[in-house]
Amino acid sequence: MQKIPNKFTIIKNNIIAARILRKLRWNKQIYCPYCGCIEDIRPHSNLKNGLKRYFCDNCMKTFTDLTGTIYEKTKVPLWKWVYGLIILLESTGSLSAAELSRNIEVSYPTALKMLRKIRKTLVNERFEGKLKGICESDEAWISHKKNQQILLGITERDGSVRFFPIIDRSDTSLYFPHRKYVEQGSIVCTDSFSTYNNLNVRYIHHTVNHSIGEFAWRHIYTNTIEGVWSMLKGVIRTIHHGVWKRYLQGYCDLFAFMYSHRSLSISEKLNLLISKSCQPRYCLY
Ligand SMILES: [Zn+2]
């Protein structure tokens, strides 16, 4: 794991920030973002701010430490990005664009774009691997002004959480995300809503009937996912003052990242977040 220096040493120090980004991006293996070649790469030149340029003998193109990442062509100094990521991870749940702009002295629209880029890098986390063990599922309405969206939340007990936007609460809409992202044979606990009954086909399905005052029996309960909804709604209501429907998934992905990795230290989370944000946005090979 890359040891992250104290956040105050990063202030106004682009060289340290560039070193952190370079180490976490390449992870000891430099590859060409255009053709994927790892053998014919040689150093080309040193850029200002501690960044390096490389030359690929295979496709005859040059690239830098930031090519293909969200930091490419950014006008915001690199230390502000790294410092912003640290205060995002130190925050409780999420960070508003207004707070980020105050902390790193950029304009509000710039802070908004930075956070949007960071959230976009987490989109793939939703599709990585399958949930297993004892899972809890529930759906909830998230609304802001005239925007209303139903989300299906599935969480592993003591593990990670994922959110899926669904168009309605029909059998198919609720069953499909389970089929794709929950391992067959797992235990799934839900409330007594009848459209969850299809889950019996692939999973060991248990229900709790809240309407008759039944909330928990041995390992059968949905209190974990109810708690997750409470936290997510709290973050959206108090920090972001409502979220437009088209951006909601990004906010949910960031929340899911923070929740799923809650047991890691800030340093470990920063390693993970920077590695994800340095993954190429495009792959030409
Ligand atoms: Zn190449």
Image (tube, rainbow, N blue to C red):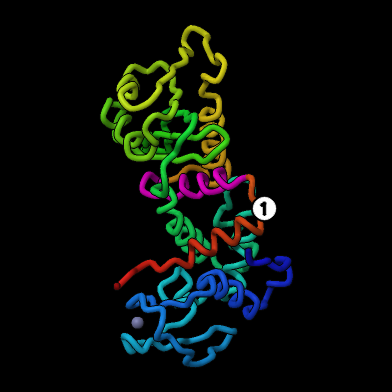
Residue 18, given in percent of the width and then of the height, sits at: 58, 77
Q: Is residue 254 magenta?
A: yes
Q: Mark 1 packing: few (<14 Cα in 10 Å), some, or many (20+)?
A: few
Please identify the quadrant where the C terminus is shown.
Answer: bottom left
* Furthest-bottom residue in this view: 45
Residue 230 lies, in percent from the top left, at: 55, 32
Task: Tell me which amino acid carries mark 1.
Answer: Ser
- Quarter occupied by residue 178: top left
Q: Residue at x 39, y 34 (%)?
A: 152
Percent coordinates x, y for residue 149 in the rendering: 37, 36
Residue lying furthest top: 212
Secondary structure of the residue carrying numbered label 1: loop
Q: Residue shown at 44%/51% (left/top)?
A: 125
- Using the rendered view, name the quadrant where residue 41 is placed: bottom left
Q: Residue at x 43, y 22 (%)?
A: 190
Can see residue 108? no
Please check the rendered image and state whether residue 46 is part of the magenta-colored stretch, yes or no: no
The range drawn in magenta is: 244-262
**Which residue sits at x=40%, y=73%?**
68
Q: Decide if residue 207 is in sight here.
A: yes
Q: Is residue 149 above or below residue 268?
A: above
Quadrant of the image occupied by residue 219: top right
Q: Which residue is mark 1?
A: 265
